[in-house]
Amino acid sequence: MGYKVAVVGATGNVGQEMLKIMAERDFPADEVVALASEASIGKEVSYGDDAVLKAQALKHYDFKGTDIVLSSPGAKVSAEFSPKAAAAGAVVIDNTSHFRMDPDVPLVVPEVNPHALKEFGKKNIIANPNCSTIQLVVAMKPIHEAFGIKRCVVSTYQSVSGAGKAGMDELFNQTRAVYVNDPLERHKFTKQIAFNVIPHIDVFMDDGSTKEEWKMVVETKKILDPKIKLHATCVRVPVFIGHSEAVNLELEKEAGADEVREILRKAEGCVVVDHRADEGYVTPDECAGEDAVYISRIREDATIDNGISMWVVSDNLRKGAALNTVQIAERMIADGLI
């Protein structure tokens, strides 16, 4: 049986990646509809090697008869249209931040908590976590199952594609301006991003953390275990695609680096590349366009009891957004939920 699928935000970075991944994975769709803002009506987007879809207006679309909606139009737009699609009978898998902490909406990474999908019927909506959270919990899950994680301290190095096309354009334009000695213009980021790093993603909160850091804390607790203590520092770096994370874990049980390495090698969604030599680790450049969460630099931390450190890298547009969304739909189909 094939499904009717609507991709909301189809002309954006994540929407286009969703369409690409659906075609790559031969998603069982009989009909695919590309939806976007009125400004994008008629814009063509690729679906596989041969098919081209013309964007239709989300504002006027009737979701009746649509089976699955893959949604990434921005939180405000999703807040309005995802419930409308769900009320029309579609299962909505939403990539925005709007529904993530709703207690009636499952927040799911298929390799980590697929059992939560069974709760989707309360609102007919499933939320896709934040990109930085997804790769973190994929790496943490097998370690938590084996040894228990008491505390996690993570520093992220997040690419500009996490801020959308505007972020990628700003890095490109500023880099060019540096080389040709033109004035540097800032529109998307709070400070210059070319040849710089910015310890500020999303708005500041009352306790001094940013909302991006808060998201990592609350989402990890909802997805993996509410007892895990987590502290995050999120940094924007001049990389186009691929988020990196330096992760330090305090475990409940003693675990050597070799044990952790072998557990991660066997874990779904994880690829370990960990050689203590030049080039024996993965960087964002190598992970771009790849589906896996790559883990390197696994080592023991002697400054705390049962301490483990590691380096975690993933393509934020794929596993951090579009791929995870498509995988949720695939898992729901496989489990007979759709």
Image (cartoon, rainbow, N blue to C red):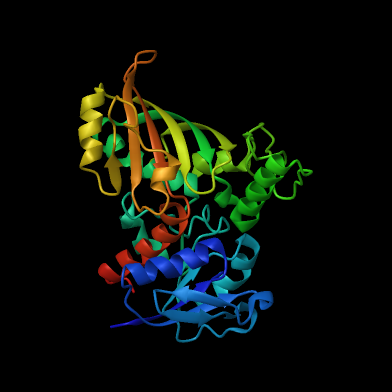
Residue 6 vs 245, above or below: the answer is: below
Which residue is the extreme one toward the top?
Answer: 303
Please identify the quarter of the rendering in which residue 91 is found.
bottom left
Foreground pick, 3 / 54: 54
Q: Which residue is painted at 50% across and 81% down in the image?
A: 53
Q: Quadrant of the N terminus?
A: bottom left
Foreground pick, 318 / 79: 318
- Locate residue 102 relative to residue 272 in the image: left or right: right
**Where residue 83 sits in the image (x, y, percent)?**
55, 71
**Where residue 321 sits in the image (x, y, percent)?**
46, 56
Q: Quadrant of the C terminus?
A: bottom left
Please identify the quarter of the rendering in which residue 41 is found.
bottom right
Residue 228 vs 306, above or below: the answer is: below
Q: Is residue 125 visible?
A: no
Foreground pick, 236 / 90: 236
Q: Which residue is painted at 43% across and 56% down in the image?
A: 318
- Locate residue 197 relative to residue 325 in the image: left or right: right
**Where residue 19 sits in the image (x, y, percent)?**
44, 70
**Where residue 134 sits in the image (x, y, percent)?**
42, 47
Which residue is the extreme one toward the right?
Answer: 183
Q: How many marks?
A: 0
Residue 171 vs 124, above or below: the answer is: above
Q: Is residue 46 visible?
A: yes
Foreground pick, 65 / 196: 196
Q: Which residue is painted at 56% across and 69% down in the image?
A: 9
